[in-house]
Amino acid sequence: MAEITAGTSQRGARAWVEQDAMFHSAIARASRNGVFESFIAEIREALERQSQLLATAAKRQEQSDREHREIFDAIAAGDAEAALHAMSLHLHAVADAVNSLTQAHLTDIRDAEGAAN
């Protein structure tokens, strides 16, 4: 997993998205929770599309790399509390980025509708 979290933001967006997907799959496998692993496998395509959007539109590669590193380090240290905290911060940051992009898109739509009227 260390190679997955090592400097992926320095690669192109497509390579970063692939590494991001590999990280999420590795976390699911490491959980030893078959239901979670199956769930991640089922939504992999959606995760990749989201990662692509966030990598290009929200410029989240470097921040996500740091968040992934914190998650990985906590898991490697056997610190479940720190891993939970790092994962929570990561999920909130992703949600914030998605919400920001959604709001910006809605604003663009409203502006376009206003200009058309």
Image (spheres, rainbow, N blue to C red):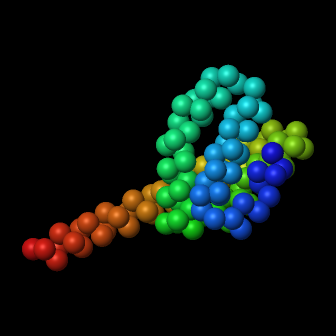
Is 38 left or right of 75, judged from the image as shown? Answer: left
* Closer to us: 51 or 106: 51
Which residue is found at the position 63% from the left and 23% from the top? 35
Which residue is found at the position 56% from the left and 39% from the top? 44
Which residue is found at the position 49% from the left and 58% from the top? 53
Is 47 left or right of 74, judged from the image as shown? Answer: left
Q: Tell me if residue 16 can be seen.
A: yes
Residue 20 vertical position relative to residue 8 in the rendered view, above or below: above
Residue 108 vertical position relative to residue 19 in the rendered view, above or below: below
| Extreme-bottom residue of the structure | 115
Residue 110: image location, x then y, percent: 23, 68
Which residue is found at the position 45% from the left and 63% from the top? 100
Residue 103: image location, x then y, percent: 38, 63
The quarter of the rendered structure image containing the C terminus is bottom left
Q: Tell me if residue 82 can be seen.
A: no
Residue 22 vertical position relative to residue 33 in the rendered view, above or below: below
Residue 30: image location, x then y, percent: 77, 33
Is 35 left or right of 112, judged from the image as shown? Answer: right
Count the marks: how many? Answer: 0
Residue 84: image location, x then y, percent: 73, 42
The quarter of the rendered structure image containing the N terminus is top right
| Extreme-top residue of the structure | 34
